[in-house]
Image (spheres, rainbow, N blue to C red):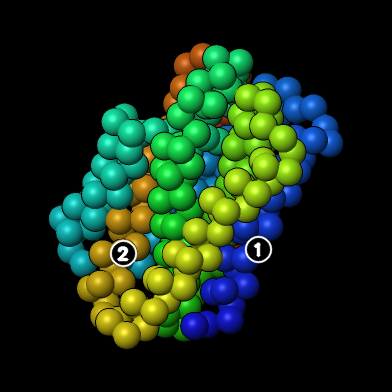
Amino acid sequence: MDFNILAQSFLTVISAIIGAATIFLIKLNHEKLCTLISFSAGGLFGAAIFSLIPESLGPLSSIEIGIGILSGYGLFWLLTKYYSHVCPACSASHFDERTAKKFSEIVRSLLIALSIHSFLDGVAISTDQVHKHLFSTTIFIAILSHKLPEGLALASMMYSASYPKSKILIYVLVVEMTTIFGAIAGSLVLKYYVSQVLLGIVMSHIAGGFIFLALHAVLGEMLKNHTKLVITAFSSGLVIILAISKFVH
């Protein structure tokens, strides 16, 4: 198990906890939430476009990459449509009283869906250093930036549904710890069963999930609220990931 992978996954959990704790300290309005979520969505989209997909181009054909992307996108779409929102931070509009009250009724399904999401985040982190020439900081930075609004969203819903503060932090910690488990599992699998094809499949699949999360975060907000703000924040996250990607490579 690579120490750097473990450290990166641990830092993403800390980011989520900080986001969760923020809800007890400051009052965030819809506009600020929209900015934060849109920025992190741009980071995820940038990681998919500038890091994960290009790294998959070597071992896989364009058709195979397309299938991988569709599989990742389709997994999150199915979970969101037929089970529960896989990402509570994927729209600032989710922060309303109706959602908060409904959360108390669907807490188990939402936490399970978010755990799957976080586990795949960990797997994505594990791909960074399977081979030194494939190392990319962009995936880690994108996930790190997304974890803060993710923890904030989860805590906000639970807080509005009258969960005690201690229980909120415990729930967020338990759910986000699956990121570390995903990093460990991904690292072990890719270490002992590593091949360029397998790595390409994993990265293209994760890219599809990132694209779903990014689009799901911004499309609704662009149509309903703050179009210019969403585009600006999303573009900022995208450009930063592009710059990091170019610098690292």
Three-letter amino acid code of the residue under disc 1: Leu
Looking at the image, is 55 positioned above or below residue 34?
A: below
> Is 115 displayed left or right of 148 in the figure?
left
97 to the left or right of 75: right
The answer to which of 169 and 65 lies nearer the viewer is 169
SS of the residue at dot 1?
Answer: helix
The x and y percentages for residue 211 are: 39, 44
x, y percentage for residue 45?
A: 46, 46
Q: Which residue is mark 2?
A: 202
Residue at x 30% of width, y 49% of height: 72
Residue at horizontal 48 percent and vertical 25 percent from the top:
105
User: Residue 196 lies in what quarter of the image?
Assistant: bottom left
Tag 2: amino acid: Val
Task: Tell me the crowding category of disc 1: few under 14, some 14 to 19, or many 20 or more residues within 10 angstroms, Cα based.
Answer: some
Badge 2 vs badge 1, beta-carbon distance below 8 Å? no
Q: Position of residue 190 (x, y in %)?
A: 34, 78
User: On screen, 23 above or below 211?
Assistant: above
Rounded to the nearest angstrom, the CA distance separating label 2 from label 1 is 22 Å
Disc assigned to residue 23: none
Give the residue number, with chain letter if any, for mark 1: 11
Q: Residues within 10 Å of mark 2 (few under 14, many from 20)?
A: many
